Amino acid sequence: MPKDTENGPSTSRAVVTGCGSFAPLKLLTNDDLAKMVDTSDEWITTRTGIKVRHITTESETTAFLATEAGKRALEYAGVDAKELDLIIVATITPEMPFPSTACFVQEALGAKNAWVFDLAAACSGFVYALHIVQQFMENGRVNKALVIGAETLTKITNWQDRSSCILFGDGAGAVVLERRTDGSRGIMYSTLGADGEYWEALNCQAHGSRHPAPRPLEDPEKVFMQIKGREVYQQAVRRIVDSVTDCLNRCNLTLDDVKMVVSHQMNARIIESAAKRLGLPDEKVFVNISQYGNTSAASVPIAFDECVRTGRIQKGDVFIFVAFGAGVTWGANVIEF
Ligand SMILES: CC(C)(COP(=O)(O)OP(=O)(O)OC[C@H]1O[C@@H](n2cnc3c(N)ncnc32)[C@H](O)[C@@H]1OP(=O)(O)O)[C@@H](O)C(=O)NCCC(=O)NCCS
């Protein structure tokens, strides 16, 4: 069973007051990939729903993407960077092993009053980070926070492995959260889970303590991301369905009360399959993977930003974030905007 925490009796709530996103300008289409590996636009589109992904140039880094998304979210919320108490950057492709990507973002934004850290829960990182902010705002220790999901997965992509190189893209998305005591519900509930037994389903092994950087790797491919797509696929559908069901039950909501489910964009077929099992109508499931590929921790906030900017989610709407990723990890948040 996933671990979970309900909103306590506190009237202090974590409310989303701004969002923003940023994707690098350079594009990589399915036809471009077909020139690099034995694949086709038809195969990729049918199996994943992806048409194009944004990819970083050598000089564009995770902190750069994160800072750009953060600036946009702060502007939307009308919050000055100096007002922030906390910045969390959810990422598995950090600027460097240390210091944290969040330190670079803090410096670039001039958020001198914030304490900051990175959170590594792969594609579930953004959803995990929101749960942490929820706790700090409900107990009154944080007033204003910036949560960013930012990834440069194409920098650890094996461009010769057709089963993985077609899946990923780069980007960043961010939200500003503010502690409110005015009756706003904000983050109503979060459910999180993990199962380390399945760590091999999705991993990148180089440059940690098991395979330290200067030593030659017995398998050079360990510098790249490795995935067992079919295993991930099956687990992802189950965990997404269970997480959303848990959210609905614990908040005493039905699908009629929910304006939109904003899922991690890992594969259009995974999202469709989960939506079908949940009985979610098409208009309540947001899918933008065709334009971004899988951007891991960045995908939920990028999708949310698009939902807000196109009017699909408006102030007062209740929506659900849900994610599944390496670890394996999963989680969901129910939020009133
Ligand atoms: C990767 C994924 C798209 C593969 O789709 P699938 O339907 O499961 O396909 P399979 O892995 O069973 O492969 C089917 C065939 O297509 C081939 N194939 C794999 N990638 C291919 C590509 N890019 N182009 C053409 N053929 C490809 C395989 O070699 C296999 O051939 P075979 O039957 O001759 O062995 C899908 O499993 C997926 O999206 N999984 C989750 C991805 C993931 O881990 N995301 C990150 C975590 S959030």
Image: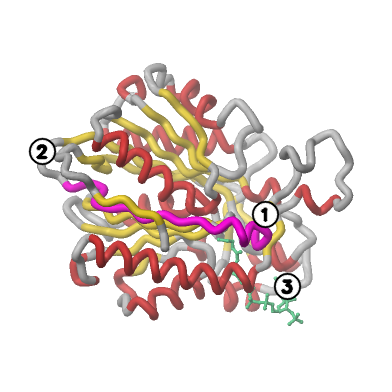
Q: How many marks?
A: 3
Would you say 41 lies left or right of 224 here? Answer: left
Q: Nearer the viewer, mark 3 or mark 1?
A: 1
Categorize mark 2 by other alpha carbons within 10 Å: few (<14), some (14-19), many (20+).
few
- Residue behind mark 2: 182
User: For the residue with label 3, is its CB less than 8 Å from the closest atom of ligand 1?
Assistant: yes
First in sequence: mark 2 vs mark 1: 2
Depth check, front residue: 255 or 317: 255
Question: Circle 1 — which element?
Answer: strand
The residue positioned 20% from the left and 66% from the top of the image is 253
Question: Circle 3 — which element?
Answer: loop
Residue farthest to the left? 182
Q: Give how far apart the Cα atoms at labels 3 and 1 are.
A: 23 Å
Question: Circle 2 — which element?
Answer: loop
Q: Amino acid at mark 2?
A: Asp
The region drawn magenta spans 185-202
- Residue behind mark 3: 39
Q: Is residue 104 visible?
A: yes
- Residue behind mark 1: 203
- In the picture, the quarter occupied by the N terminus is bottom left
The residue positioned 34% from the left and 38% from the top of the image is 133
Among the 4 quarters of the image, the one containing residue 36 = bottom right
Q: Please, is residue 278 above or below residue 307 in the view? A: below
Q: Does the stretch in magenta take in 198?
A: yes
Would you say 37 lies left or right of 45 here? Answer: right
Q: Does the stretch in magenta take in 175?
A: no
Q: Nearer the viewer, mark 3 or mark 2?
A: 2
Q: Position of residue 259 (x, y in %)?
A: 24, 64
